[in-house]
Structures are given as C-alpha cells and as structure tokens.
Image: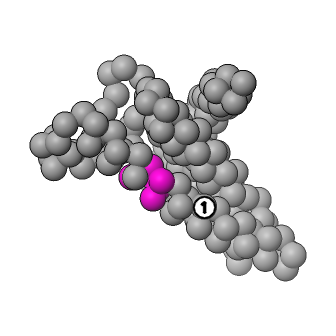
Amino acid sequence: MAESLVRASWSKLKKVNTFCATLSGVILLFMALSITVDVFMRYVLGSPTIWITEVSTYLFLYVIYLATAYALQQGMHIKVTFLRDFFGKRTQRVLDLVTSILAALFTAVLLWQVSEMTWTAFKGNWTSPTMLNAPYAVIHGIMVIGSLLLLVSFVCSIILQFRGEQTEPAGAA
C-alpha cells in the first residue's frame, strides 16, 4: 500500500512540476518580449519604461523556482560523473542516494530560510524601494513554493531510489 502511495504521489507531483515548468516557460517568454519592447522604446523611441527591468528581475525568480523540481524529475540537474563512472552500478546507486539525501537536507534548510524571509516580509509589509512598490512577500513567496516542490520531489525520489526504482526518464543521466 505504501508503495502505491509513493508511486501515485510521484505521478501527481510530476504533473504539478510539469505545469510549473510550463508556467516558467510562459513567464520567460513574457520577459523576453517585454525586454525587447523596452530596448526598442529606449533606443529607438528614446522613451524607456520604468517597470520592465524591475519586473523582469523579480520574474526571473519565478522562472528559476518554478522549474527546479521539474529539472530534478527530468534528471537535468548538474551532475559531476567523472569519478562516479569508475564505480560499479551498486556503488553508483548508493552514491546517488547519498547525494539525493544531502541535496534534500540542503533544500530543507533553503525552504526554512526562505519561509522565514517571506513571513518577515509579509508581517512587515515590506515593499520594493522603487516606484513600483512591489510587495516582497509576493516576490519571495515563489521561493517558498519552489523550494517546497523541490523538497517533496527529492523525498519521493529518495524513497524510489532506496527501493531501486527509476525516478528519471530513460535517457537522462
């Protein structure tokens, strides 16, 4: 029963991660188009916008944090394999498991820290010190969501790795 629960959770999580990565791509497209418009307005019309640079900077956080869990599930995180390849399959599995556990611990600390930062920004009603006056809680909130998705993805991946099941697509690694 626990096995099917983990498999079902991993399957649903993969759908959420895929949606978030797609949203990340849409945001990236918006950023590219808005920066192109800003460059045109600045250098051709001589009338730059006041919001595109700041909004693009904040949206870049959304792009990064919405896509990290998907990158993990697809096996697209950076891997240094030159030493790993000297070992047998069993040792490689153990190294992968240990690496995933350490990465999950790092992600848990990241989640804790960004949650504290976001909560402090929310309580203090912090806003950006610009004309846009963007609320930092909304800007930082995506780091909480992305870190949570990444942590849950790591935990599911660790459980599946411990059982010897494949968590990445066949071509990834």
Image position of 139 (left or right of 42): right
For the residue pair 5 and 82, the one nearer the viewer reads as 5
When asked about the image quadrant of residue 169, the answer is top left
User: Which x, y percent locates residue 100?
Assistant: 44, 49
Inspect this view and state whether residue 67 appears.
Answer: no
User: Which x, y percent locates residue 86?
Assistant: 12, 43
For the residue pair 149 and 21, the one nearer the viewer reads as 149
Does 126 sit above or below residue 135?
A: below
Q: Which residues are magenta?
A: 99-103
For the residue pair 35 and 126, the one nearer the viewer reads as 126
Label 1: few (<14), some or many (≥20) within 10 Å? some
Q: Residue at x 80, y 71 (%)?
A: 119
Quadrant location, the C terminus = top left
- Mark 1 highlights which residue? 108
Quadrant location, the N terminus = top right
Q: Residue at x 77, y 65 (%)?
A: 137
Q: How is the image coloured?
A: one colour
Image position of 127 (left or right of 83): right
For the residue pair 154 and 4, the one nearer the viewer reads as 4
User: Which x, y percent locates residue 43?
Assistant: 45, 53
Residue 166 drawn in magenta: no
Q: Amino acid at mark 1?
A: Ala
Q: Residue at x 46, y 36 (%)?
A: 161
